[in-house]
Amino acid sequence: MATVRIVLDTRPSNVDKNNKYPLVLRIGHKTQRRDIPFYIRLGKEDFIELDSIEGKKKTAHFKLKGVTNPVRKTKRIHSLYSDIDLWMDENKGEIKLWPITQLKETIERKFFNKQSELSLLKHGAKLIYRFHAEARFSTASSYEDALKIVVKYRKKLFGKDDKQSIPDLFDKTKKDMFTVREELKPYDMPIKAFNFEFAKDFKTYLSTRLKSKNSINIHLRSLQAILNDAEKTYDDLKGHKPLESFKKSSTANTPIVLTHEEINSIRQCSYPEGGSKFHVRNYFLFMFNNMGMNFYDIALARVEQFDGERFSYTRKKTESEGDFFSIKQNEENLSILSYYIQNKSKTAYIFPIIPEGRVGEAIFRAKRDKLKWFNNNIKKIATDLRIEKNLSTYTPRDTWTNLGLQMGIDIRKISSGLGHSSVEITEKHYSQLIQEKILDEINAQITKGPSFN
């Protein structure tokens, strides 16, 4: 059972030049102890512990001497002690499951007015550790990226270089926790200092650093999620929602789509076997031929998912919804698969994107690095073919959708092929393409005139 006492910490290491010792609240829990200081120093003769009978008469188990207003200080400290003792008794069922560090931090927050010690990066470290433990690496990465931007802004406020890349905010070598890297601790800040005024200035900074409004809003949404988690976790942060009034909704990006002729030019181009552009061309076509398959899904594709005729997979992004696809492969994909699966075991990855043996976060990092590599090389291919469009991993999916709409295929069928849970999602993502098609048809009907030979 957890206990608390008011004691004088008389360890030799704590005595000062005046032969005085710190007065502390001593917490005992699971054979461990932690101290919270009152920032009062006393000589041994100035801290008087009372026996139980005398203590009850004086409503305290101790009294102080040798300080200003000793009676008032004794009453204040004992009142605090009584509140803590009562709270611990009322919550003993929950507290017995806590480590002593959590108990100490909670007492500091609730009773020692430690609001200002609740820091953004420290809470972020706890949250991101939780995501790693749950294998939610993509979410963890988004949150850490948002915190990195805050650190860069803080560096700018300190007159430091804010352009330098930050590989990692946290030391992730410990098994049970992440901690803020030592060199970045000066740029941490109290959560309450991230107020509305700070948020406005920070958003202005984002606007100078990032070109895309969507990128700005992604970071703001991640930061709001971190702040919301802190607000729900700590009683003294209730109602602290500095980003709540900020508009953070994403705007639909204009899909970059290719024509049939441009797709065919990619099909007909040739690159030296084994080179980056050789592989990227193959991946691009494989994704397009499989109804705009996601890059992460082809990265995870294994030989056993291909039966010689059909390729089957569950879409990673919506696997919780059971999005399963079994797609008959065309001649082009059969040729691509034949090249990559030769001499491989059934459990091997089809494509050389993620190295065999990687697990957990290592898979996520490999996929993220290869995605950048893909986008870089597909742009080089576009340049080679004089396609003046900004191609990316999204292009196969957007092109497949656009060509289907142009051919008059029912949007419900297209939505099913994309793995969307409803037609409304398809309409939202491709609203501009759909709107253009509708307006073209309407305009053609309205402006239809006599035939010209």
Image (cartoon, helix red, strand yellow):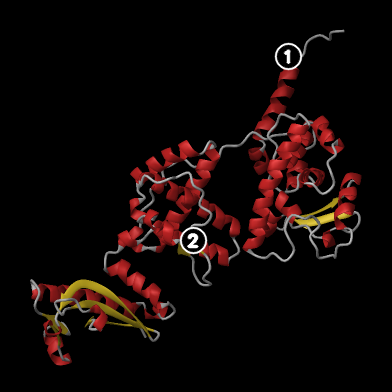
Q: CA distance from mark 2 to mark 1?
A: 63 Å
Identify whether 150 is placed above or below 320. Answer: above
Q: As drawn, is 137 to the left or to the right of 448? A: left
Identify whether 263 is placed above or below 112. Answer: above
The reply to whether residue 210 is in sight is yes
Bin the neighbour count of mark 1 within 10 Å (Cα to Cα): few under 14, some 14-19, many 20 and up.
Answer: few
Q: Give SS at disc 2.
A: strand
- In the rendered image, residue 322, in percent from the top left (x then y), is placed at 72, 58
Q: Quadrant of the N terminus?
A: bottom left
Q: As drawn, is 417 to the left or to the right of 151? A: right
The reply to whether residue 249 is in sight is no
Q: Residue at x 48, y 57 (%)?
A: 169
Q: Quadrant of the C terminus?
A: top right
Q: As drawn, is 72 to the left or to the right of 330? A: left
Q: Give SS at disc 1.
A: loop
Q: Quadrant of residue 26?
A: bottom left
Q: Which residue is mark 2?
A: 170
- In the rendered image, residue 186, in percent from the top left (x then y), is placed at 37, 56
- In the rendered image, residue 174, in percent from the top left (x then y), is placed at 51, 71
Give whichever of 104, 21 is nearer the camera: 21
Q: Quadrant of residue 140?
A: bottom right
Q: Where residue 447 is drawn, which disc sits there?
A: 1
User: Which amino acid is tagged 2?
Assistant: Phe
Give whichever of 5, 121 is nearer the camera: 121
